[in-house]
Amino acid sequence: MVPLLLRLSFLVLAASLLAYKFNTIVPEPYLDEVFHIPQSQRYCEGRWTEWDDKITTPFGLYVLSYIYTRVLLPVFPYLGQDNICSTPILRSFNALGITIVLPLLSYRVSRRHQRNKSEAASDAISIGFFPLLFFFGGLFYTDIWSTVFLLAAYERVLAGIAWASAALSAISLLFRQTNVLWTAFFCVLNVLSRLEREAIALKKKDKGGPPQKIIISSYQQILGNAWQTGDVYNPLLAEADIPGGWCLSGIVVSITSLLFSVRRFPLQTIVATIPFVAVMVGFVAFVVWNGGIVLGDKTAHVATIHAPQLFYFSLFTMFISWPLVITPSLPLRFLHENFPIIFPAPRGPIQQMPIRTSIVQRMVRTFLTLAILAGMGLVVHYNTYLHPYLLADNRHYPFYLFRRTIMAHPAVKYIAVPVYYACGWCNLYALQQPTLQSRLTRNNGDVTTIWALAYFATFLGSVIGAGLVEFRYFVPAWVLWRLAVGSKGVDQDQGGSWRWWLEIAWFAGINTATAWLFLNKGFSWENEPGKVQRFMW
């Protein structure tokens, strides 16, 4: 805990400086705060039935901030009833979340990933200093506390306490409705954990002793074992390929073995899903009653298919987290693993390169890469969508990114496809670096094949329906990715602490730049003269 407290002091100092600057230079509610702060102040005054129809998210932030102010008032009575719900006080609630609550939860999750206290403390500070969350530690937005409850639900499911996880995920829905898909992710993890325990118990019962690890050598043996004993084939992501198998074979077999295990333990599966299904059923009932997912003005949030969001996330994650991923050998490894027919790997594990495979397997792998690239090209051709708000609001960074890239020339979106693919591969590669401890002892926090599949399916489901590109939509997926990768990045089981220092320096640079732009580069619109507009995420 001492390493965490030392690092937290740095985070508190940085967030305090940010809050001071924001409250000094931008004392009035800005942008979405124009809706959030008055609504919270209504609740502070006891006007519980009044609601601003322009607000599209539920009341979680306002109720929680009300509780915060009620706790704060006896501690600081000099603030008085008139000031306890002022803009600086409400903003301080988010500062509390980003400097204390979220890092503490991140620390607990990192420990669930079997990391030592120092590494877990580093992970915690990285999450708190993450530019998209740290920036909003100076404002009154929903993102921080939405992430807090989502991460708390994740930590509880890793701890094996399903009802607590479901309850916390239900609370997270009061901050952001799309969190319901992460509830489904937690449900998958809970079911998987339950099935694995049941399979182990069955083996002990049948053999009269602790189960012995079976060496898997074929599809038939894996699936036969899953059919008979309910044993789920769920290796670490880096170990998913079966010897002698084709590309992606391990993933297919993992899914099939999971289905076989569900067939073997149907009652246990149902019991494991009940807490989370209850939350999801309640959410569906809300959607039916409300006539849609969003509250208030639904015209600005019409659901649409927008698959390139996954590509933008890959690029975003690589931009934010390159200190954890980039290595001198990475470009060569990328070529070996994606175009092996052109760039065959050396024989044997020389310089940690993959073992050379047969020419047929190399042809298949190269063809698969080309097929994926072609598919991505079709997606960007037919499904690149530019939301009207993206093109109209020049206060947000995506406005400038799109105007100077995809909108600059028709060919840019196609040229970007290999970049999307390379970034996505690098992000996945970082997830494939298991620690020595995870190879020896497994737990719920390990990045296994099924964990990765559920994670990517959940993230895709949470953003594919959003027409507007907002980096804030990527926050939950990045946070879970970052905690899974760890502060050593691709240098697992080695020194690697320099990567964390580089990451923190990179985050500090981004946070300084975004805060400086927000505070010092204001501008005005012709139709709103005298009103300062500011750049932000």
Image (cartoon, rainbow, N blue to C red):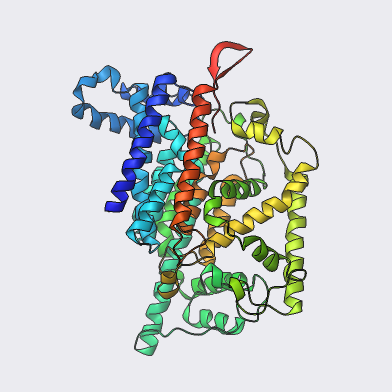
- x 48%, y 22%: residue: 30
Find the residue positioned furthest to the top: 529
Residue 341 located left or right of residue 65: right
Q: Residue 368 occupies which quadrant of the picture?
A: bottom right
x and y percentages locating residue 495 in the rendered image: 44, 63
| Residue nearer the viewer, 210 or 171 | 210
x and y percentages locating residue 121 in the rendered image: 35, 53
| Residue nearer the viewer, 246 or 42 | 246
Please tell me whether residue 27 is drawn above or below residue 321 in the rendered image. above
x and y percentages locating residue 476 in the rendered image: 49, 47
x and y percentages locating residue 32 in the rendered image: 49, 26
Q: Residue 45 occupies which quadrant of the picture?
A: top left
Say how many tags the image has: 0
**Residue 148 in view:** yes
Please tell me whether residue 76 is drawn above or below residue 133 in the rendered image. above
Residue 62 located left or right of residue 238: left
Please tell me whether residue 345 is drawn above or below residue 203 in the rendered image. above
| Residue nearer the viewer, 235 or 206 | 235
